[in-house]
Image (cartoon, rainbow, N blue to C red):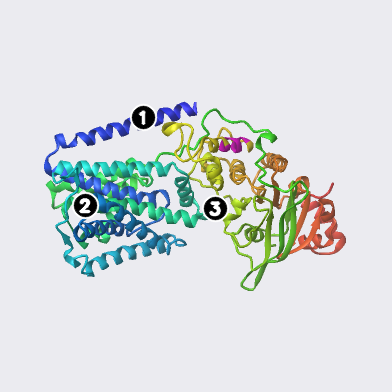
Amino acid sequence: MPRVLGLVSERRAAAGWAVTLAVALAAPLVMGSYQLSIATSVLTFAMLGLGLNIVVGYAGLLDLGYAAFFAIGAYTSSLLSLEAGLGFWQTLPFAVVATAIGGCIIGYPTLRLRSDYLAIVTLGFGEIVRIIATNLTITGGPNGLYGIPAPGIAGVSITSIPGLYYLGLAFTVAALLLSWVLSRSWLGYAWRSLREDETAAEAVGVPTVRVKLLAYVMGAIVGGVAGPFFAARFGAVDPTSFTFLVSVQILLVVIVGGMGSLPGVLLGALVIIALPEALRAVADFRLLIFALALIALMVFRPQGLWPAPRPRGAPRGRPVPAAPLEAAAPATRGQPAAGEDLLTVAGVSRRFGGVRAVDDVSFTVRTGEIVSIIGPNGAGKTTLFNCITGVTKPDAGRVVLHGGRHGRRVLHRRAPHRVVAAGLARTFQGIRLFDGLSAADNVLVGRYCRRRRDGWRTSRGLTGGLVGVSGATHAEVRRWLGFVGLGDRGDSLARELSYGERRRLEIARALASEPFAVLLDEPAAGTNPTEKNELMGLIRQVRDSGVSVVLIEHDMDLVMSVSDRVIVMDQGQMIAEGTPEQVRGNQRVIDAYLGGEEETAAETVEEVLGWRS
């Protein structure tokens, strides 16, 4: 049934786009010159909106200076036409390269910025480009450039209004196709995970720095095509066409239409550009009416006129039941044999100011075992996990993962996404899912670091599958959803799942990267007894499937039931290590948890921690 509904939905969407294109092609037959000129302006801003939609709608990066790319493309094309005598089509590749370089220039310094800081930097970049164009002699200064030749095809110049309209329509369709392909590619999924939670995206294997830079570059390239079209259409270009207000207009196109929505961007361009012109009959009040309409939209349709469709990352086909152990076993990729050292943590320390959160901690994890790390609140357990997985850089010590193609990998100097690619995955103490994505898409993002091995092309074609995501990847997504018992919840948004299901989904996302070991940070926190029992079984299944488990947990029933070894931390230090039975009677453990007299503490710790047999 999900597959049938998906095919019906895709066919309806394809029919809708076909009707829209037919109407657009027929527009010159029923429109006058003035209306057709406005329609061409709508297409120009639709192109720009599609470019900005990549940055804002897909990746969630606020850009208030997008008109800079518009200007770079327009001036590059115009200067090459006037100074080098190149034709319109010859200048296009140079304009695209110039705007891509501009995307790198703005993208690189802002890679670690978000929110207000990012907006300020992009706003400054847009103003810098406009000021440079105003003050340079080669760009014509404030007067701009004139006499820009019109584009031509087969030696015939395109100067008529219908001809320019059709050229603009062709560019808009190309921008739509590019945006559609990107939205369904691995890069599109990475952008959406970045938009939802940048820290979690990096921690599950997405190289956020590279992905953010690519968002700016791909968005800039679309603006780099709209700029030459704009300059050639009017035969002139000057700095007043690329002000901050133009950047705001482009941003409004995306917001009003619906961020991340392709039909929404087209509708937004129609509203922002055509509606003020339609209100010229009431010229004295048109800006007031337009402003009130925008306010009403933000109140009653905050997601835009045509919001992005609900994510459908569903496993295609029938729901998948819980997978048998042998079906869930990951590829070993050179994993050490059972009982051999898999993960070595040696002398890891981390200081925050005067506080030693982790103090010279050393231990090993062997292939095929479950190791639990326990200790009072504030003992440094999560900080230790962060040091191991690259989220926090340790001040001292080494973290080494044995196995894989290279045999031995030093992890403590690697970024989190490289740690995942090496074979070490994790979950978080507070659940960090991509709530705006489906359960299946969450697992798909977790497989990002294995995308090259899965293959790039879908086996279902352009309508039944996802461009750039192979059928093998969909099979893996189904497999891991089934493994954690969520085979029938692939279509559900992550935020719609119950608490226990969200915990299991986070584990499935971690396992999708096919790690040698998975680090689970308090997976039983907040679960009810039934969910806890299911979780205990799942942890054993993970171990039996060939993935070692390192577990931080306060629930001693769970710890003592599933652990092969237990490590105890207190005040950043490791105070005990051994089997559950050995740790149970350790006096330092008793003192760390309860303190007090030896006899009283020994009796009470068994009751409080559930260690009484």
Left or right, 70 with respect to 143, comes to right
Q: Position of residue 468 (x, y in %)?
A: 46, 41
Mark 2 vs 1, N-terminal side: 1
User: Is residue 384 at least partly visible in the picture?
Assistant: yes
Which is closer to the viewer, label 2 or label 1? 2
Residue 457 vertical placement versus 377 (above, below) = above
The region drawn magenta spans: 476-482
Q: Could you say which is closer to the camera, residue 255 or residue 317?
A: 317
How far separated are the C-alphas under marks 3 and 2? 47 Å
How far separated are the C-alphas under marks 1 and 3? 35 Å
Q: Could you say which is closer to the camera, residue 348 or residue 330?
A: 330
For disc 1, the marked residue is 12
Residue at 38% from the left image edge and 56% from the top image edge: 62
The image quadrant that residue 18 belongs to is: top left
Residue 321 vertical placement versus 291 (above, below) = above
Q: Position of residue 440 (x, y in %)?
A: 53, 39
Residue 87: image tag: 2
Look at the numbered discs 2 and 1 and tell me whether their residues touch, using CB distance below 8 Å: no
Mark 3 vs 2, N-terminal side: 2
